[in-house]
């Protein structure tokens, strides 16, 4: 979920770190909506591994929340789509309540060892 500029400026880094990686990526891009960034630049700015950021960007692109051109990424200019993303967050919270929260360690055990293809494209 994106965050507004006031939240971005007035929320501590500890509080922002509690956001999921896609939320952090989208929040960063939304706060810098007038610019496009490479995945490694986003990773550096939010303090997350570049491969994880690349995966988050691919998922956000699938949801049409970000746009991709060559090696650069920007937040979508579709305000309705961005507003609709909070509905996705509410649905996820509901499923977590009903089915339990996903086990991140289990996901990591099955994660690929090789970097995301977009990481190789940028090198």
Image (cartoon, helix red, strand yellow):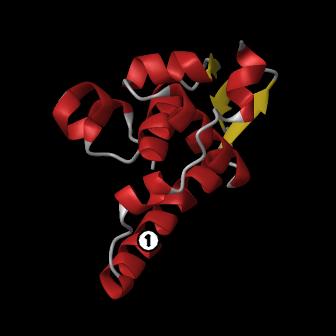
> Residue most toward the bottom?
98
Say which quadrant the C terminus sits in: top right
The answer to which quarter of the image holds residue 92 is bottom left
Q: Position of residue 109 (x, y in %)?
A: 46, 55
Position of residue 82 in the picture relative to residue 89 (left or right): right
Q: Is residue 2 visible?
A: no
The spot of residue 22 in percent (x, y) is 49, 45
111, 1: nearer the viewer: 111
User: Residue 73, relative to residue 94: is it above or below?
Assistant: above
Q: Does 97 appear above or below 82?
A: below
Residue 49 percent across, percent down from the top left? 46, 28
Quarter where residue 8 is shown: top left
Q: Residue at x 44, y 64 (%)?
A: 89
Task: Note whether residue 117 is visible.
Answer: yes
Residue located at (26% from left, 45% from top): 18
Q: Residue furthest right?
A: 70
Q: How many marks?
A: 1
Q: Position of residue 63 (x, y in %)?
A: 67, 55
> For this view, does 79 lie left or right of residue 90?
right
Q: Which residue is mark 1?
A: 92
Residue plotted at (60% across, 24% down):
39
The secondary element bearing badge 1 is classed as helix
Q: Tag 1: Cα neighbours inside 10 Å, few (<14), some, or many (≥20)?
A: few
């Amino acid at each position: 979920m994106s965050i507004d500029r006031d939240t971005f400026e007035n929320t501590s880094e500890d509080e922002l770190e509690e956001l999921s990686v896609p939320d952090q990526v989208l929040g960063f891009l939304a706060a810098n909506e007038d610019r496009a960034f490479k995945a490694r630049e986003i990773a550096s700015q939010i303090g997350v591994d570049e491969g994880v950021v690349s995966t988050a960007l691919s998922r956000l692109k699938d949801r049409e929340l970000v746009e991709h051109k060559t090696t650069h990424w920007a937040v979508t200019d579709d305000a309705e789509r961005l507003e609709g993303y909070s509905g996705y967050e509410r649905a996820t919270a509901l499923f977590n309540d009903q089915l339990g929260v996903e086990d991140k360690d289990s996901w990591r055990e099955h994660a690929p060892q090789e970097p995301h293809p977009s990481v190789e494209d940028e090198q």
